[in-house]
Image: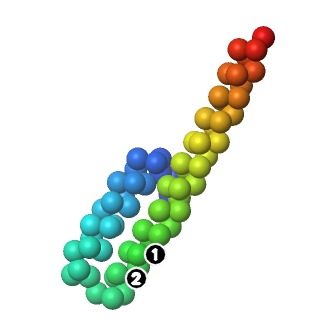
Amino acid sequence: MEKLNYEQAMEKLEGLVARLQDGTLSLEETLKLYDEASRLAVFCGELLQNAKQRLTVMEQAAGENNGL
């Protein structure tokens, strides 16, 4: 997958969803876009999970520093 940040990936995902909801695509186009949208959704989920883990580490580090 190309190097996208979260906002770019979400924007692309939203565009794909809008096209899928339009209902004018052929079956083959629908399957292709659905596959791409699914991959983007997983990618966005992974980015959010990584951000959550980073926040947890920072909160733990801040708590340890406050205990000094």
Tag 2: residue type? Leu
Q: Among all residues in the image, which is located at the extreme bottom?
A: 27
Q: SS class of the residue under badge 2? A: helix
Q: Mark 2 and 1 residues: CB-CB less than 8 Å, in contact?
A: yes
Q: Residue at x 23, y 80 (%)?
A: 23
Question: Residue 31, relative to residue 18: is it above or below?
Answer: below
Query: At numbered mark 1, what does the secondary structure look like: helix, strand or loop?
Result: helix
Image point (36%, 58%), residue name: 12
Within 10 Å of disc 2 (Cα), the crowding (few <14, some 14-19, many 20+) is few
Q: Residue at x 22, y 74 (%)?
A: 22
The x, y position of residue 26, in whole percent, is 28, 87
Say what amino acid the circle numbered 1 marks: Asp
In this view, the residue in front, 1 or 19, is 19
Q: Is residue 31 left or right of residue 62?
A: left
Mark 1 Cα shell of 10 Å, populated few (<14), some (14-19), many (≥20): few
Residue 4 image point, x, y percent: 47, 51
Residue 32 appears left or right of 2: left
Going 61% across and 46% down the picture, which residue do you hit? 50
Label 2 to label 1: alpha-carbon separation: 6 Å
For residue 31, the mark is: 2
**Nearer-the-camera pick, 67 or 7:** 67
Q: Quick one: 67 or 3, which is closer to the camera? A: 67
Question: Residue 61, position in %: x, y?
Answer: 71, 25
* Badge number at residue 56: none
What residue is pinned by disc 1? 35
Left or right? Give the position of 23 relative to 60.
left
Q: How many marks?
A: 2
Image quarter for residue 32?
bottom left
Scheme of image coloration: rainbow
- In the image, residue 49 lies at what x, y percent? 59, 49
